[in-house]
Each structure stands twice: as C-alpha cells, then as structure tokens.
Amino acid sequence: MSASRTGAGAPGGRRYHHGDLKAALVEAGLELARAGGPDALTLREVTRAVGVTPNAAYRHFADHETLVLAVATRAQDVLAGAMATRISAAGQDPVARLRGVGLGYIDFARAEPGLFHLAFRSHHQLVREPERDDPAPFRLLNDALDGLVEAELLSPTRREHAEWACWSAVHGIADLATRGPLHDADPAIVDSLAELVVDRIIDGVRA
C-alpha cells in the first residue's frame, strides 16, 4: 500500500509510508540493536521508531521472537557483507581468503558488538543443516574451506566438519574481545591475538 497515514498513537504524530512496513520494522530493529544490543530490540521501541502502534507489527510478525529472528537474520547479512569485503581484499589465494573469513568476522564483532551479539542470538539459527538454509556468514566459511579442497590445500577427510572448528575458534576470540577479558585490552594486542587464533586454526585444520 503506497498511501501514507498516521499510525494511531504514533510518537509525535509521525507519518509513515506503508510501502513495506515489514522491512521498515526490521531496519528500525537493526538500528536499535546496533546502539543497544539485543536487549534494546523491544516491540514497543521498534514500532515507536517507525511511527506505528505495536499492533501494526502483528500484521507481519506473529510475536516478538519472530521479529527478533528477522532482525537477527538481517544482522547476519550485514556481517556477511563485511566478511565478503575482507575476503575480496585477500585476492584469489585460498588460504588468504579463509583467513579473511575469520578476520572479517572478528573485525565486525569488534566494530559492531550490538549487531554481532544479536546475529546469533537464537539457537534456531545455528542448527541448520549445511547447504540448506545456513546463516550467510556460515556459507562464506564453507565456501572458503571448499576452495582449499579444490586447490588441493586441504584433504576431503580433513574438510569434514572443519567449519565447526573454525567457527568455534573465531567466535570465541570475538566474544572475548567484545564482552570478555579482552574487551578493554589494547586494540593492537587484540589484533595480534585475532591473527594468531585465525592462523593457528587454519594450520590445525590443514595439518
């Protein structure tokens, strides 16, 4: 629907063009999470940001959790975009591209902790079977590992489940750097530790 209208009770009487209310709610949720993390993503605040009543959101989302999952998926896409930029900068070398996956993931976590902690908030987004409906960052990791196999730099046997070893390592250091003991550490030290973890896990997977 393209006509504009004022949502009843909308803060400040703001008007919203309902061309795509669902997308607008997700983007508003993304900005709230960016500033305040997952806890900032309440239905009331999301609808307030768009300028509609909470009831309007139920036309597109069954409940609050459904909205959170939609915003988390969008956060995954933003994370994947940042990782893809780092991968592209690595050129065509398969090892460098896998390194870019890990460092891109960690860099994003440190730059956007609110979105990072939202991105994998729900276990429902972590248990998807490979090559079916995986989170976008996970697909990039799998693609990079498959690239090593194609280049004969990783054996098919060592490739099996290697994505979980890699993800565990980079997610662990990202978590330590954003809300663990490395949170207040010198950024240069965290940079060095991130590179160490990524390089060690790549060496370990290929060994």
Image (cartoon, rainbow, N blue to C red):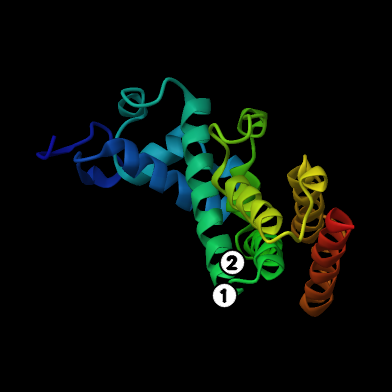
Residue 106: mark: none
Amino acid carrying mark 1 in the image: Ala
Amino acid carrying mark 2 in the image: Ile
Location of mark 2 (residue) = 87
Residue 152 x, y percent position in the rendering: 73, 59
Location of mark 1 (residue) = 89
Tell me the quadrant of the picture where the N terminus can be found.
Answer: top left
In this view, 203 is above or below 163 = below
Tell me the quadrant of the picture where the C terminus can be found.
Answer: bottom right
Left or right of 92? Residue 22 is left
Left or right of 4? Residue 165 is right
In this view, 193 is above or below 64 = below
Q: How crowded is mark 2: few (under 14 residues within 10 Å), some or many (20 or more)?
A: many
* Helix, strand or loop for disc 1: helix
- Which residue shows up at 21% across the image and 44% down it? 16
Q: Nearer the viewer, residue 148 or 140?
A: 148
In the current view of this chain or complex, which residue is farthest to the bottom? 188
Residue 90 x, y percent position in the rendering: 61, 73
In this view, 7 is above or below 164 = above
